[in-house]
C-alpha cells in the first residue's frame, strides 16, 4: 500500500493537464536467552463466525487472550500515571525491539498515539498452562499465536481513545515479512489476518496493519492471559448484570439474574461463557466489550487513581503479563507526557469498535471487511492528527468551530499536473458536507505544480471563519492567504453518484466562496461522519454502566 490517498477520478474540467498515475540490562539478559520454539500451527477448524460451537478449549484460549489484551489497553491508555510514578512495579516487564524486522514502507507518524495490542496465547509458564490444557498438549509448551489484534488509537490531545478490534477470521492481503525467529523473508499472500503473527511475529503484524489501514503504529504491546485474574482482583472485581441466571458447567460459572460482582476466577468464567443467550459468537463478543468497558470505567475512576496501594497492585499485575517495544518501555519523558494527559481521560472518552465485516463469499467460516465502510473508519483514525484550534473573528462574529460545513462554499482548483485531482478532492469535501460550488484549474507561475495546498479568499469576518473551518478539514493544513487567484476552466460541481452533497442553492445569499487550491502535498479530507455499519459496531464505555446482557 504505497499510496494512502486512493485512486484519482477523471476530472472533465482539466483539459490542459497531463494524465499521471497516483501513485537496559534487562534487554541483555533477554537477548541472551534461548530463542523460543516456533508457534503452533494455525487454528483452522471449520466453524461458523456467527454461531456457537467449536472446540471449547480453543475458544477459551481465544477469549482469555482477547480480554487480556483489552485490559492491557486499559493499563496503557488509562493508568500510565501509575506507570511513570511506580516504575519499580514494572521492573520485570519484557522488552523486544522489532524495528529492524519491519521491511515494508511505513505510513508517516502523526500527533496521535497508535498502540498495537496483540493477545498471545502462549502456553509458557505455569500460570498460562493451567488454562487450555488440551490445546497445550497439541503444541510445544512455549509456542504462541494470536487470535486477538486491537489497535488502540489515542487522540492527539489525549482526551479520547478508540480500540479497534480486527476479527481474527478476516481474509486480507498479508505483505512480505521477515520471520522474527529465522529472519527469513516470507512472500506476500492472502490469508487470515492472525497468520501474520503466527508465522512472522509482531513485526509482520505491524506491517500488515499499517499496509491495510495506512495508520502508523507507534508502539506495540504483546500480552498473555496469565495475569487476567490478578488484574481483575487488583481492581476489586467487576460488576456485571445478567438478564437471566447462569449455571454453566463448561465455564464453571453459577450466577443469579441481575447484578453480581465478579472476582478474577468468576470473570474468567464469564468471558468464556458460551451456553447463554443465543449462543452466538457475536453476542459473546458484545458481552466481552461491555465487560471491558466496565474495566475502563473502574481503571480510570478517581477511586483507583487516588489509592496508591491498589494502583501499584493493579499496574504490577498488568506489567507481569506484557512485552513492549523498548521505545515505549524506556522513554520516561514519553511515559510521563502520556501519563499526565491520561489523567484527563475518562470512561466517556473510550470507545470500542469492531471493523465492519461480512461473511466471505467463498468461505462462510471466514469474514471479509465491508467496503468502503472499513476504509472510511481507517481514514477517520488516520486523519485525527491535530487538535482543533479555531481562530476567533473580529466584531463578535462566529468562531470557525461554530461554522457548519454546509455553510462553507468552496471552489476547488487543481494546482497539480495530476489529472482528476480537483474532482477527487471535491468529492471528499462534498461527502463531509462542504458546499462545493465549482471546479477548475490554477496554473502556478513558471508552469510547475503547486508544492503545497493553499486557501485563498477575500478577507471579511465571515470569510475568515469559513476559511479556517475549511483549512481544519484538509490534511496537511493548507496555507491561507487573502485575495483570490485566477481560475481557469471553471465548471459547476456535480456530486458523484451516491454522494449526499449540499448544493450551491442551499447557501445563504452573500456567503463568500473560499478557494482551495490543491497542491502536491494534499493527503486527504478529514472524515467526521462514519458509516452506520461502524456506528452499529461501536460502544462507548460510559453507556454500559447499567446494561444487562
Image (spheres, rainbow, N blue to C red):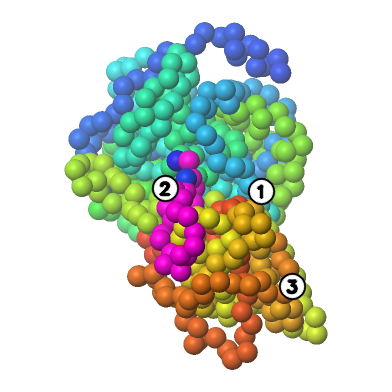
Examine the rendered structure and indicate whether residue 28 appears above or below residue 391: above
Extreme bottom residue here? 509
Q: Is residue 372 visible?
A: yes
Q: Is residue 200 left or right of residue 191?
A: right
Q: Position of residue 363 (x, y in %)?
A: 20, 41
**For the residue labelled by badge 2, is the local secondary structure a helix, a strand or a loop?**
helix
Q: From the viewer's perspective, tell me whether residue 338 is left or right of residue 204.
A: right
Residue at 64% x, 35% y is 315
Residue drawn 41% across and 47% down?
288
Q: Which mark is residue 416?
A: none
The residue shown at (30%, 46%) is: 368
Q: Separation of disc 1 and disc 3 at Cα? A: 28 Å
Q: Which residue is mark 2?
A: 288
Residue 525 x %, y %: 54, 61
| Residue 544 can be seen, yes or no | no
Name the N-terminal-most of marks 2 and 3: 2
Residue at point 34%, 39% (across, down): 172
Question: Label 1 neighbourhood size at 10 Å, few (<14), some (14-19), many (20+)?
Answer: some
Which mark's residue is nearer the viewer, 2 or 1? Answer: 1
Q: Which residues are magenta?
A: 2-22
Camera-side residue of 174 and 166: 174
Q: Which residue is mark 1?
A: 111
**CB within 8 Å, label 2 to label 1:** no
Q: CA distance from mark 2 to mark 1?
A: 30 Å
The residues bearing labels 2 and 3 have C-alpha atoms spaced at a distance of: 53 Å
Residue identified by numbered label 3: 482
Considering the numbered disc 1 on the image, is that residue within a helix, a strand or a loop?
loop
Q: Quadrant of the N terminus?
A: top left
- 63 falls in the magenta region: no
Answer with left or right where residue 129 lies relative to residue 407.
Answer: left
Element carrying mark 3: strand
Amino acid at each position: 500500500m504505497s499510496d494512502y490517498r486512493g485512486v484519482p477520478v477523471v476530472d472533465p474540467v482539466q483539459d490542459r493537464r497531463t494524465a499521471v498515475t497516483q501513485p537496559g540490562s534487562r534487554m541483555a539478559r533477554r537477548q541472551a536467552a534461548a530463542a523460543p520454539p516456533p508457534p503452533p500451527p494455525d487454528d483452522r477448524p471449520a466453524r461458523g463466525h456467527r454461531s456457537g460451537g467449536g472446540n471449547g478449549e480453543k475458544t477459551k484460549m481465544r477469549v482469555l487472550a482477547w480480554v487480556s489484551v483489552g485490559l492491557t489497553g486499559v493499563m496503557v491508555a488509562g493508568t500510565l500515571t501509575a506507570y511513570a510514578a511506580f516504575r519499580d512495579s514494572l521492573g520485570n516487564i519484557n522488552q523486544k525491539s522489532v524495528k529492524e524486522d519491519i521491511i515494508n514502507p511505513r505510513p508517516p507518524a502523526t500527533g496521535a498515539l497508535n498502540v498495537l495490542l496483540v493477545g498471545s496465547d502462549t502456553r509458557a509458564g505455569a500460570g498460562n498452562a493451567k488454562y487450555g490444557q488440551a490445546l497445550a498438549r497439541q503444541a510445544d509448551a512455549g509456542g504462541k499465536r494470536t487470535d486477538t489484534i486491537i489497535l488502540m488509537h489515542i487522540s492527539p490531545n489525549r482526551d479520547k481513545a478508540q480500540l479497534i478490534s480486527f476479527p481474527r477470521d478476516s481474509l486480507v492481503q498479508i505483505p512480505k515479512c521477515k520471520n522474527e525467529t529465522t529472519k527469513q523473508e516470507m512472500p506476500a499472500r492472502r490469508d487470515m489476518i492472525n497468520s501474520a503473527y503466527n508465522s512472522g511475529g509482531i513485526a509482520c503484524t505491524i506491517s500488515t496493519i499499517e499496509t491495510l489501514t495506512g495508520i502508523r503504529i507507534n508502539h506495540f504491546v504483546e500480552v498473555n492471559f496469565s495475569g487476567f485474574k490478578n488484574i481483575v482482583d487488583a481492581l476489586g472485581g467487576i460488576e456485571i448484570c445478567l438478564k437471566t441466571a447462569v449455571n454453566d458447567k463448561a465455564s464453571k460459572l453459577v450466577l443469579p439474574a441481575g447484578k453480581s460482582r465478579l472476582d478474577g476466577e468468576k470473570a474468567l468464567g464469564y468471558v468464556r461463557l458460551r451456553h447463554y443467550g443465543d449462543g452466538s459468537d457475536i453476542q459473546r463478543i458484545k458481552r466481552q466489550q461491555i465487560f471491558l468497558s466496565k474495566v475502563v470505567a473502574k481503571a480510570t475512576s478517581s477511586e483507583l487513581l487516588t489509592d496508591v496501594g491498589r494502583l501499584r497492585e493493579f499496574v504490577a499485575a498488568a506489567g507481569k503479563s506484557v512485552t513492549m517495544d523498548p521505545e515505549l518501555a524506556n522513554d520516561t519523558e514519553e511515559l510521563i507526557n502520556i501519563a499526565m494527559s491520561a489523567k484527563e481521560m475518562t470512561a466517556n472518552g473510550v470507545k470500542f469498535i469492531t471493523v465492519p465485516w461480512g461473511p466471505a463469499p467463498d468461505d462462510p467460516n471466514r469474514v471479509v471487511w465491508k467496503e468502503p465502510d472499513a476504509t472510511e473508519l481507517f481514514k477517520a483514525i488516520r486523519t485525527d492528527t491535530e487538535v482543533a484550534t479555531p481562530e476567533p473573528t473580529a466584531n463578535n462574529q462566529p468562531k470557525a468551530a461554530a461554522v457548519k460545513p454546509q455553510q462553507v462554499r468552496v471552489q476547488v482548483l487543481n494546482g497539480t499536473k495530476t489529472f482528476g485531482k480537483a474532482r477527487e478532492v471535491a468529492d471528499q469535501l462534498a461527502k463531509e458536507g462542504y458546499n462545493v460550488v465549482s471546479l477548475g484549474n490554477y496554473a502556478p507561475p513558471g508552469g510547475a505544480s503547486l508544492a503545497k495546498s493553499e486557501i485563498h479568499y477575500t478577507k471579511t469576518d465571515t470569510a475568515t471563519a469559513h476559511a479556517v473551518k475549511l483549512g481544519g478539514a484538509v490534511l496537511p493544513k493548507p496555507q491561507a492567504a487573502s485575495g483570490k487567484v485566477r481560475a481557469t476552466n471553471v465548471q459547476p460541481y456535480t456530486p458523484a453518484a451516491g454522494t449526499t452533497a449540499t448544493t450551491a442553492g442551499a447557501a445563504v445569499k452573500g456567503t463568500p466562496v473560499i478557494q482551495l487550491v490543491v497542491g502536491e502535498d494534499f493527503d486527504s479530507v478529514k472524515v467526521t461522519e462514519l458509516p452506520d455499519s461502524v456506528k452499529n459496531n461501536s460502544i462507548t464505555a460510559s453507556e454500559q454502566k447499567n446494561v444487562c446482557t
